[in-house]
Amino acid sequence: MLDIVAALMIFIVTLILIITQPRRLSIGTSASIGAVIALLLGIVSWTDVIIVTNIVWNATLTFIALVMISLILDEIGYFEWASLHMTRLAKGSGVKMFSFLILLGALVSALFANDGAVLIMTPIVLAMMRTLMFPNHAILPFAMASGFIADTASLPFVISNLTNIISADFFQLGFLQYALVMLMPNIISIFASLVVLYVYFNRSIPKTYDETMVQTPMSAIQHKTLFTITWYCIAFLIVGYICSEMFSIPISLITSLAALFLLICGSYFRVIHVPTVIKNAPWAIIFFSIGMYVIVYGLKNVGLTTIITSVITLFIKKGSFLATIGTGFLAAFLSSIMNNLPTIMINSIALKDIYATEIAQQLTIYANIIGTNLGPKITPIGSLATLIWLHVLRRDGIYISWAYYFKIGLILTIPTLTVTLISLIIWGHIIL
């Protein structure tokens, strides 16, 4: 009984420290402290630490490399170039620009992970809105859209979200296998996101804007040769992801090689300040991933993850439809109250012990990923991407209260999550 209380208290206190970050305490330090305490109390063993490290190392290194690539591309002006293209393509229509920027955000999130997308795209979008002299009430829809789409469009590939990578590694899902299953749910999620965002904010979106105020896209590019090289690097990434499944190559190796190549090229052309890029990479995520997973493993050791296993088992007994919807919403609820990374870890461990038909088990695994990607948008603490996004907005003078965010998050997330899970059920029964 004491072990259960201790494991639960370590988990809760660590979560509070991660979310509040008192005295700028990093998420990696908080998770590491919790893991050390769990180790000292005997809730986890050194063997558990080794198991956890084997689970998260590939996901963590992949994520760091992707963020570094995003930072490098941002320095080159790649994302601003793309945003200017979208703005000029809209030809003065505010509604078209709103839609195109959402689609661009979805593409960036898919290729460079949701955290990288929200970190890079949000300030670019805000700067563009101010260049067009939009009032604050007209900027808010674009700001909300940039944060919302970063998570809801992070389903298509293993590399699109840290939760995807962790799940894929844990359940040994291949890159192509994962992409095929998530093809339709991702399309539906993007479309639903676009619709609910437009319906909610359509009165605030400017009908027109002066397109002559928009700069030419190439004006954003800092070095044309390096800009051309980035296209080859992106092609290398895509081919590498496909080959990773065929030849059992860790995705982290592919992303790390691409990041290293861009660092070398950026340094050679004197466009990138390498120490700054390395310094700004999210190294704390290494200690966060290992530390948090160790703490979650402690919950497993004292039997607390069996509660979630029992709940999902009840869903499965009612059929694959309820199993998928129930697992997705359970993951969404847990993500919204305790962050999606601990949730994906806890639920993955719980799902490992599920006894079900092959298709039911596969559907619950993917439903868990969808729930942990979309569900965090209900509350500000649901994902690291949202916390980063709120910080970027505050830095740019836009303040969104937690109460206001919760109201909007609930309204936007529930319909999007529902139709996405239903699409998974329909699509999953076709291809699984």
Image (spheres, rainbow, N blue to C red):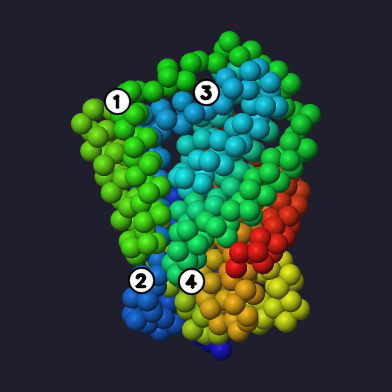
Query: Residue, x 52% and y 28% (percent of image)?
Result: 83
Marks 2 & 3, CB-CB < 8 Å contact: no
According to the picture, the residue beneath numbered tag 3 turns out to be 84
Pick the front one: 262 or 423? 423
Using the image, determine if residue 364 lies above or below residue 274: below
Residue 123, position as x, y percentages in the image: 51, 32
According to the picture, the residue beneath numbered tag 4 turns out to be 171
Q: Which label's residue is closer to the chain start, 2 or 4?
A: 2
Select label 2 or label 3 by which is in front.
Answer: 3
Instruction: Tell me which amino acid carries mark 3.
Output: Leu
Instruction: Tell me which amino acid carries mark 2.
Output: Asn
Gap in angstroms between the C-alphas marked 1 and 2: 39 Å
Q: Which label's residue is closer to the chain start, 1 or 3?
A: 3
- Location of residue 233 by image quarter: top left
According to the picture, the residue beneath numbered tag 2 turns out to be 54
- Give the class, few, some or many, for how many residues have Cα within 10 Å of label 1's Cα (few <14, many ≥20): few
Query: Residue, x 55% and y 16% (percent of image)?
Result: 214
Q: Which label's residue is closer to the chain start, 2 or 3?
A: 2
Marks 1 & 3, CB-CB < 8 Å contact: no
Q: Which label's residue is closer to the chain start, 3 or 4?
A: 3
Q: Is residue 149 left or right of residue 159?
A: right
In the image as oriented, which residue stretches furthest toward the bottom? 1
Q: Which label's residue is closer to the chain start, 1 or 2?
A: 2
- Count of picture labels: 4
